[in-house]
Amino acid sequence: MAKPLSASKMVEILRAEGLTVHEVRKWRTHNRNTKGPWGPVNGVMIHHTVTRGTEASVNICYNGYSGLPGPLCHGVIDKKGHIHLVGNGRANHAGSGDSDVLRAVINESRLPADNEADTDGNSHFYGFECINMGDGKDPWPEAQKEAIEKVSAAICRHHGWSERSVIGHKEWQPGKVDPRGFTMDGMRKRIAERLSGKAPKPDPKPKPVTYEPFPGAGFFHVGQKSPIITAMGRRLVAEGCGRYEEGPGPEWTEADRRSYAAWQQKLHFRGKDADGIPGKVSWDKLKVPDGGK
C-alpha cells in the first residue's frame, strides 16, 4: 500500500526515466475523486484503447464518453512512446475486479485466475492506456513497449514495488482481453530487468524550461517547413485544439491554421484576431518548447 503520487512527482519520475511527457490541459486536477476513494495505491494497470490516432485517443481518455466520464486513465502511451498525462487521482479505468488478484498484487505473489468482480480497482491502480486497436493485427512499436516498461518501472521504483505490482486489465477483470498483442509475463520480465539496474539520477542542475520566441506572423505561410511548426501543433493538441487528421508535422497547412484558430477562440479572441495566424500574445500563452523540441 502506498500514498498516491502527486502530479509534480509523477512528471518528475517519468522524465527521470527518460520519457517524453506531455501535460494535457488541466490534468493535474482532473479526476473522479468525488465518486469514490483514491488510494492507497497498490499497482499499475495496463490497457489498450481500441482506438487509432494520438489526438483522438488522448481526447477520449481525457473526456470519456456517454455513460463513462473521464479521465479514463492517468496517462496515454502513444505509438512513439510519448506519455500524455490526462488525469491525477481516481480515474475510470479498472472497474470492478478480483479481490484475490488484488491480494496477490499487494503480496507480490503469483496471480490467480480472475474469476470475480467484487473489488473496486479504480481506487487501487494507476492506469495507462496504450494506443492500439487490440485486434491482434495492430502493431506494437518497440518505442511504445519500452515506454510501458519505463512508466511501470518508474512508478514501481518510487513506491518500492517489484514487477509483480504491474498487471494487465485482462488479469484483473473477467472478460477483459487488454492489453492484446504482447504478454504481461514478458512485460513484467522487462520491468524486472529495468528495476535491477540503478535508478536514473536526476540532473543536479536541471535546465530551465524555455519557450520558442514568436517568429512573427509572416513566418506562417504555405510552404513553410520548420520543427517549430511541429512543436506548435503538439501544444495545440495538448490544449484540446488540434484539428488534424494526420500529424502535426513540420509543414504549415490548413489544419495548422484551423487548429491555431481554435486556440485563439479558446483565449476568447474573435474576428480577425481568431483567423488562425499566430500573434505574439496567443503565441506566448501557448508556450511552444524552445528549438521545436
Image (cartoon, rainbow, N blue to C red):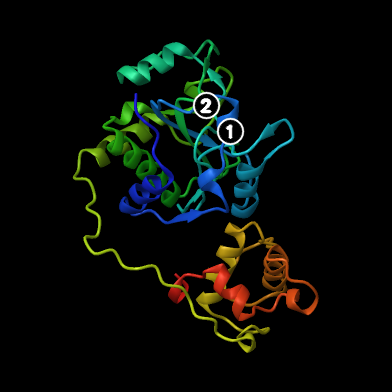
| Left or right: 10 in relation to 222 | left
Q: Is residue 76 visible?
A: no
The residue most toward the right is: 271
Residue 29 position by quadrant: top right
Picture coordinates of residue 273, whole percent (x, y): 74, 77
Residue type at numbered disc 1: Arg
Identify the element where label 2 is drawn. loop
- Quarter of the image with the C terminus in it: bottom left
Q: Which residue is mark 1?
A: 32
**Labelled pair 2, 1 in contact (Cβ < 8 Å):** yes
Looking at the picture, tell me which residue is in the foreground, 202 or 146. Answer: 202
- Quarter of the image with the N terminus in it: top left
Q: Residues within 10 Å of mark 1 (few under 14, many from 20)?
A: many
Q: What residue is rendered at 49% in x and 21% in y?
A: 172
Q: Which residue is mark 2?
A: 122
Residue 291, placed above or below residue 179 = below
Identify the element where label 1 is drawn. loop
Q: Residues within 10 Å of mark 2 (few under 14, many from 20)?
A: many
Residue type at numbered disc 2: Asn
Q: What residue is rendered at 61% in x and 44% in y?
A: 62
Picture coordinates of residue 157, whole percent (x, y): 28, 38
Looking at marks 2 and 1 on the same chain, the residue that comes earlier in the sequence is marked by 1
| Left or right: 74 in relation to 264 | left
Picture coordinates of residue 75, whole percent (x, y): 50, 44
Residue 186 position by quadrant: top left
Q: CA distance from mark 2 to mark 1?
A: 9 Å
Q: What residue is rendered at 46% in x and 12% in y?
A: 99
